[in-house]
Image (tube, rainbow, N blue to C red):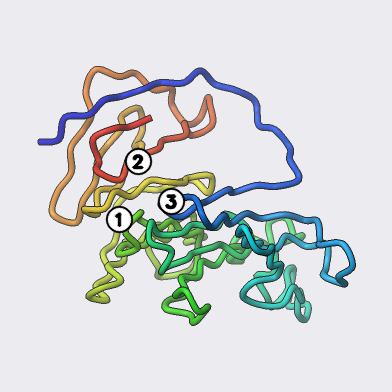
Amino acid sequence: MKRLLLLILPFAPPLLAQFTGLAANGDGSILYFSSLLRLRGTTQSFYSKIFRLTAASAAPDLFRSQDPGDPIGWTVTNFYNLIAPRVSTDGSVIAFTGTRPCGGGSGCITVQTAQGTVLDRAGNTLLTSIGYVDLSPNGRYALFFARNTFGSFIPQAEFVDLATGVHTVVPYSIGASARHRIANDGTVALNAGKSIRLWHPQGEQVITGLSIAAAQSFPEPFLFLSADAQRLV
């Protein structure tokens, strides 16, 4: 059973910023982030883009174009707003989420609005799947979540071992705002009802002694799990 140092931060209202989703490799020499802005002198779109910042340069639109694509029903073909980058400690694996809007009200109940992509250092796609994506610090595990499961046969969340290719269904719902949920050993921090759980393909642990408001009353609390799975914020 894991023993955790648990830190609880007071709730703060969300802030709007020009840059979101800051993610750095282990020594901080490479920084990834998402922004609607574009570099001066370029003709990049004003959709959300993934930037990579190093001491030498800043590179916009790192992995693919920002074209929404063609209209299909209430949405478009491409997941063109690129957000929430994640990078492994050694910088060899990068992940980000592409989103697309849906403007059809109840017509959106079967529309997938997010797609996660995992790439190597050179920008080659290792894995793409429906939902938002999170990445373990060592780059071995990916978590796809916040999927639309109405009328489809895909699970709400799925855990992927990138080294073996094994996919495991996560039997809990995880909100789209989740970040930094996976430790290097594959432990995933999540909340289920009023409890915090540490889930792993081989089992799970309920963190006792905490009281969390039901999801119907408050937004899902932000959880951040350290690389060694010993600290939960």
Q: Which residue is mark 2?
A: 190
Secondary element at image label 2 = strand
Mark 3 closeness class: few <14, some 14–19, many ≥20 residues within 10 Å: few
Residue 27 circle label: 3
Kind of residue indicated by mark 3:
Asp
Residue 39: x and y, percent? 81, 62
Which callout, 3 or 1, points to the residue nearer the camera? Answer: 3
> Residue at the location (48% across, 34% down)?
220
Residue 20 circle label: none
Secondary element at image label 3 = loop
Q: Which residue is mark 1?
A: 170
- N-term mark: 2 or 1: 1
> Residue at the location (41% across, 35% down)?
223
Residue 159: x and y, percent? 31, 61
Kind of residue indicated by mark 2:
Leu
- N-term mark: 3 or 1: 3
**Label 3 – label 1 distance at C-alpha:** 31 Å
